Amino acid sequence: MKKTIMRQYWRLQQSQTLISMAFWVTTLTLLIWPYVSWRFTGENTFLGISTTYYGLASIGALVGFFVLFIGFVYDRFLGLWKEQRTVDTERNPFGTYALIPANVFVIGHLNEILRRQAADDVRIQDTCAWVDSWLQWCGEQEIWVRSQKFWDENLPSPVPDLHFFPSGLVDASRDRADSIAEDGS
């Protein structure tokens, strides 16, 4: 239920840019129109079109240009979006402490290579053991379960018992996948 609501919220955010631009243009155009409408009478035409339409269109274009100009200044000179991206990254678990499933594979294989290359180095072995526990935690998360379910259903063979996971973790994920609905509930 929570993911369904968040998906709808995300869809609203994605369309918000276009909708808000249309609202800005129409609202400001119609607020400005009473102050300049006396210059555009309905009897006057240009190329067969009433000058009223030209007036409204030109005000709308100027308002649209002004809103885009404000966005340009905001982006180029104020740079406030950089702080927003920093906060987004800090709040994103995959930018801080969690791994996407594809990265679990990469880090798992690299960790195994490092473990074999430096078999005598105690610090590296300790680090590899720590990475193993991190990978295990990542393999127990819902995103791994969903990804593994997708791979099991869409690839020619199911996900094998991966060497960088503790024995049985892949099967446990497969069992959990049956209890997770597609909509995230």
Image (spheres, rainbow, N blue to C red):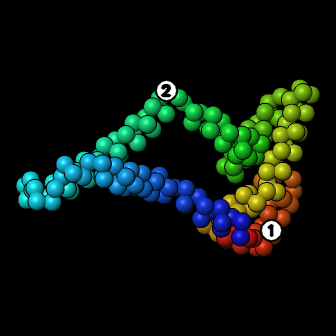
Q: Horizontal and vertical percent for residue 78?
A: 53, 29
Q: Is residue 150 above or below residue 128?
A: below
Residue drawn at (68%, 60%) of the image: 147
Screen quadrant of the N terminus: bottom right
Q: Can residue 113 be seen in this view?
A: yes
> Residue 176 shows which numbered tag?
1
Q: Residue at x 79, y 30 (%)?
A: 117
Position of 185 compared to 41: left or right? Answer: right
The image quarter in which residue 118 lies: top right
Q: Position of residue 100 (x, y in %)?
A: 69, 49
Asked if one can make out residue 156 in the rendered structure from this viewpoint, the answer is no
Q: Residue 158 carries which label?
A: none
Which tag, 1 or 2, sits closer to the chain's start?
A: 2
Please name the amino acid that badge 1 sits on: Arg
Percent position of residue 160, x then y = 74, 59
Element type at marker 2?
helix
The CA distance from mark 1 to mark 2 is 50 Å
- In depth, the one of 118 and 1 nearer the eye is 1
At 82% from the left and 57% from the top, the residue drawn is 140
Q: How crowded is mark 1: few (under 14 residues within 10 Å), some or many (20 or more)?
A: some
Q: What residue type is labelled 2?
A: Phe
Q: Name the residue under label 2.
A: 77
Q: Considering depth in this image, is 65 or 175 the residue closer to the camera?
A: 65
Q: In this view, does 72 lie to the left or right of 171?
A: left
Label count reads 2
Q: Are marks 1 and 2 in contact (CB under 8 Å)?
A: no
Task: Name the residue: 40% across, 55% down.
Answer: 27
Residue 182, picture quadrant: bottom right
For label 1, the SS is: helix
